[in-house]
Image (cartoon, rainbow, N blue to C red):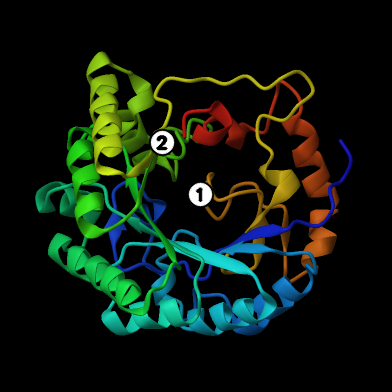
Amino acid sequence: MMTPELPRELQIEVTGACNLRCRMCLVRYREPLDRRRASIDFERFKALVGALPELEKVTLQGLGEPLMAPELFAMLEYGAARGLRMGFNTNATLLTRATAERLVDVQLDWLHVSLDGATAATYESIREGSRFDKVERNVRGLVEVMRARGAVRPRLSIVFVAMRRNLAELPDVVRLAAAWGIPTLRVQNLSHSFSDTDPAGDYQEIREFAEAEALWQSPSAAADGVLDDARALAAALGVQLRLPVLDGEAAPPPGQPGCDWPWRSAYVRQDGRVQPCCMLMGADRAILGDLAAAPFPVIWRGAGYEAFRAALVTDKPPDVCRGCSMYRGVF
């Protein structure tokens, strides 16, 4: 396949710092990062975006909590002036009323709120350091701001990471979405199995967590039943519901990639290193370039990217892709 045109969409990790230690996130298993030293510089952001004249969409999201990025609103204002569609995921713990008002003012296109349980006990045991009541208050506050202003942006969703420990609460999360005024609930599996890593190496803990909690490890009729209940309830309450496949292993057509991400987008870490996507996690995995050494268009057209794309159209994809939920069709 030929080298694609420069991407029209991009994902940028605006910060690697986070105020929580979520059990399914690599942040939990690494040393905490300082929010100033581990956030992308506004000048680098402008240079990156400026190098992509056809850019239309930017996801300001990585392993950290975007609302901790010191220059987040400068980036949002710059993107709005360029007419870019921009949004991100948030744990909502920092989503104060004043922040909600600023997000509406800057015309953020979408905002996804992470909520992995319908009870404080379940949610707080997964997203360590958070408080369920605070998240509820903040989300309701954003909805109130939007209603008071007649705003239709940002488009709001709840994102629920489905695991063995929380799946039973999914129908109640549907009820919460309806009660809080959130129109969409997006349910996803864990993003990666980390099966390509050394079982006793640096990724041991998160690999073991995925083995214990991933629904794809042993799909069951009980899990299917919970999804069916959630689907019926969402239809009754008017909540748009996106559900994952629990046991798929999608095989790409011959000669076609199992994933199209490296042809349409890229993931730029807060330190300037470029990776094919955000699904793989880890600063040492599939590094295709560094903005400190070359501008993004050179990296996009470089030998590293070309080799990665070439491997994806074979039956022997890069090892890091084999454990990816998106590549395997179970995300």
Specify the label residue 155 is tagged with: none
| Amino acid type shown at disc 2 | Ala
Q: Which residue is mark 2?
A: 200
Q: Nearer the viewer, residue 171 or 43?
A: 171
Q: Nearer the viewer, residue 50 or 43?
A: 50
Q: Name the image quarter holding the N terminus.
A: top right
Residue 310 visible to an observer of this rendering: yes
Q: Nearer the viewer, residue 241 or 95?
A: 241
Looking at the image, is 205 positioned above or below residue 274? above
- Left or right position of 56 against 15: right
Looking at the image, is 98 positioned above or below residue 190? below
- Left or right position of 116 against 272: left
Look at the numbered disc 2 and give the secondary structure of its residue. loop
| Amino acid type shown at disc 1 | Met
Q: Residues within 10 Å of mark 2 (few under 14, many from 20)?
A: few
Q: How many numbered markers are drawn? A: 2
Look at the numbered disc 1 and give the secondary structure of its residue. loop
Residue 261 sits in quarter: top right
Residue at x-position 18% and y-position 32%: 168
Residue 86 sits in quarter: bottom right
Mark 2 or mark 1, which is nearer the start of the sequence? 2
Name the spot of residue 130 as percent of width and height, x first: 20, 63
Q: Which residue is mark 1?
A: 281
Q: Residues within 10 Å of mark 1 (few under 14, many from 20)?
A: some
Residue 75 sits in quarter: bottom right
Looking at the image, is 327 positioned above or below residue 179? above
Name the spot of residue 301 as percent of width and height, x first: 85, 53
Residue at x-position 29% and y-position 68%: 143
Name the spot of residue 262 as percent of width and height, x first: 71, 45
Measured Cα–Cα span from mark 1 to mark 2: 17 Å
Check the image and name the residue furthest to the top: 221
Residue 35 visible to an observer of this rendering: no
